[in-house]
Image: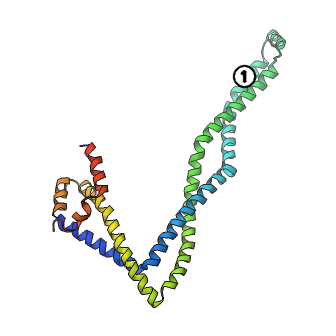
Amino acid sequence: MNLTVWLDIGVSILFILTVIVCYRRGFAKTILGLLSSVISLAGAYFIGSWLSKLIYDNAIKDKIVSNVSNSMESSVSSTTSKVETATNDLPEFVDKILGYFGYNSSNINKGIDSTVHTQSQNVANGIESVIGPIVTALIAFLLVFLLFIILRFITGKISRMICRGFNLPVISTVNHIVGGVVGIFNALILIYFLSGIVTYAIPLFSGGKISYEDFNLAVESSKIFKIFYEHNFLADTLKSVLSVFN
């Protein structure tokens, strides 16, 4: 069986299956399922983003700055202690000269300690500014994932309760018929986009067995796939991008 036949069969099967699935689900279940997913995702995103920032600022940020600063100070403590020892061992005449200008070994040591502390804080704040967004993003990802599951469960329960009203004999029949009609449009849209992707996916992942020229010839010989292939903006866009590398 050649590629042309497979393309037409694939489009036909996808169209029929999409219409059947939407018919069985019905218009109400299809629309409510989509709405519940969108609402759950949007709610999880906004709540998760807000909570992740709140958790980081109140429970993690200060610990990062404190730990890094303490680590920096401890790493240079041996050096500063040696400097302080050296300043304490300054010759007496040098100490007297410094005293004329308002300095002594004690003031110098305090200045060194203050400088080390300030520099450690600056380094810690700099590191936190880099690590912070990464940690916040990770927390947000986990929260959005968990919140989506929770919200999807809740909205799913609500949508199922609403769908029970569509199980009455007359309403149920209309619901399934309208669902089938919606399925036709869903199938057409789905095939339209997939045809644009398949146009370059098959030659690209065929391992050299099918060239772009062979695929285009198969499309031109097809009866159904060709309808979706022609004037397909996605296929045209991919063709323009690929032409740059030719």
Quarter occupied by residue 143: bottom right
Residue under the image location 34 percent in, 66 percent down: 190
Q: Quadrant of the C terminus?
A: top left
Q: Residue at x 68, y 51 (%)?
A: 59
Depth check, front residue: 91 or 217? 217
Category of crowding for the residue at label 1, using alpha-carbon neighbours closer than 10 angstroms: few (below 14), some (14–19), many (at least 20)? some
In this orientation, does residue 94 appear? Answer: yes
Which colouring convention does the figure follow? rainbow
Task: Examine the image and state in which quarter residue 76 appears.
Answer: top right
Q: Looking at the picture, how far across and down is residue 56, in whole percent? A: 65, 51
**Residue displayed at 35% across by 71% down:** 185
Instruction: Compare residues 243 and 139 and report the one nearer the observer.
Output: 243
Q: Report the residue marked by disc 1.
A: 83
Numbered disc 1: secondary structure: helix
- What's under tag 1, amino acid-wise? Val
Up the image or down, 244 lies above or below 207; here it is above
The residue drawn where x is 36% and y is 77% is 181
Q: Nearer the viewer, residue 69 or 167?
A: 167
96 with respect to 4 (left or right): right
Name the image quarter holding the N terminus: bottom left
The correct choice, above or below, for 93 with respect to 185 in the image is: above
Q: Is 136 in front, or is 239?
A: 239
Residue 112 x, y percent position in the rendering:
74, 25
